[in-house]
Image: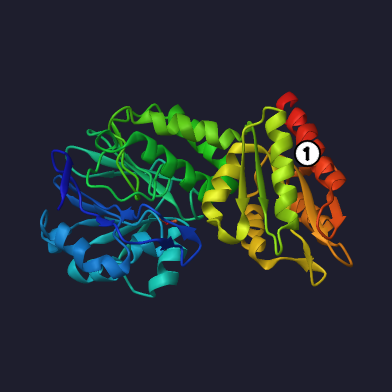
Amino acid sequence: MAVELAPGVHWVGVVDWGIRRFHGHELSTHRGTTYNAYVIRDEKTVLVDTAWGPREQEFLAHLRSVVDPATIDYVVANHAEPDHSGSLPAVMRLCPRATLIVSRAGAQSIPGHYHASWNMRAVKTGDRLPLGRNALVFVEAPLLHWPDSMFTYLTGHNILMPNDAFGQHYATAGRFNDEVDTGELFAEAEKYYANILTPFSERVLKKIEELLALNLPVDMIAPSHGVIWRRDPLQIVQRYQEWAAQRPAPRAVVVYDSMWGATERMALAISAGLAEAGVDHKVFHAAVSDVNDVTVEIFRARLVLYGSPTHNGGLLSSIMPLIEHVKGLRMKNKIGAAFGSYGWSGEGPGLLEAHLRDSGIEVVRAGLRWKWQPAEDDLAAGRALGRELGALVRER
Ligand code: FEO
């Protein structure tokens, strides 16, 4: 069902309640997602973004309930990623005279995806498209989330449509932030930021400064995923400034894999030491934990401990997806250490330390390693490491 945001402005997107893996299988979406698209009817009619191709029919039904697609004058594609552009071929077939508005980088990525000869116009920051009473203003937002990403602002109704930025993978019955559970909403918004936007944090801060300097009134922020920020819309902008600053809390995450329990016992000993130091923390067995959920906890925490036994001269493979994911996110202001049991060669902790450093995490103590199952003095060393790092994390 289409939903009215303001007179002449409608949400015509799709709620995908069932999706549990996104970006292929890269991202868990425990609460589903939405693909948001918006229709603006003025003297000119505009469609802003579309929906993922497999949900095209539902999207077109919502679109048709508001407007005859043949009458659309402009289609704005803020970003080429297929969750937003996937229904473009169908839309452009229905309104062949429409002009497709893209960013300058979008003028490469959209044809690169669809190889179609659409009537396309590239816009840059500050360009204005008069619609009649109101107008669209475009702001290029490279790397939020791809180099082609763009924000579209509607004057008069003061609605910012920033595509991926300020979004959440969150399927809900209500379309607005004042209609949903606030705890769930911010949990999903933070998971989205931590797992997708962290590497672009400096750009996030600069783009927000640039937007605020424009002094545009903002009555709603209508992203391309999740709910629309209608009540106190700038609250999510303020959260983004906090997240992008990357000042993690004095918390810790211990994440490990274990074959026969030796490394797990050490993880629990370190956890006991952290508790003795009064540091709140979480412990995850990597093989049975969701990579994206663990990533959020790492994003929030100042201290990260990786543990794995040595296996075939390397690490247990189930911890590697998390390590690779965190490496790509280039988090800042974190300290870490490694631990792991071994039987013969003992490379595990050294390899984990290299991964921590490659992830931009400062290794502040030499890794703990011990042969076979930990003896009482090994476990005592683990508790001592937890206390020592706990004290360090509290004082920094
Ligand atoms: Fe929601 Fe970058 O696509």
The foreground one among 152 and 337 is 337
Residue with the most extreme front position: 376
Which quadrant holds the C terminus?
top right
Q: Is residue 327 left or right of residue 179?
A: right
Please tell me in which quarter of the rendered image ligand 1 is found. Answer: bottom left
Q: Does the beta carbon at disc 1 come under 8 Å from ligand 1?
A: no
Q: Residue 106 appears at what percent x and percent y? A: 43, 59
Is 381 placed above or below 92 here?
above
Residue 116 picture quarter: bottom left
Task: Please give the name of the residue rendered at 55% of the width and 56% of the height, measured from the top-left corner.
Answer: 289
Is residue 136 visible in the rendered structure shown here? yes
Q: Residue 30 appears at what percent x and percent y? A: 40, 54
Residue 50 picture quarter: bottom left
The foreground one among 195 and 56 is 195
Residue 126 picture quarter: top left
- Residue under numbered circle 1: 383
Q: Is residue 357 left or right of residue 345?
A: left
Is residue 366 visible in the rendered structure shown here? no
Label 1 Cα crowd, 10 Å radius (few <14 / some 14-19 / many 20+):
many
What's under tag 1, amino acid-wise?
Arg
The foreground one among 239 and 275 is 275
Is 348 placed above or below 255 here?
below
SS at badge 1: helix
Q: Residue 217 appears at what percent x and percent y? A: 32, 27
The foreground one among 242 and 80 is 242
Residue with the most extreme bottom position: 115
Task: Please give the name of the residue rendered at 35% of the width and 45% of the height, measured from the top-left corner.
Answer: 223
Task: Please give the name of the residue rendered at 74% of the width and 24% of the height, measured from the top-left corner.
Answer: 395
Applied colour scheme: rainbow
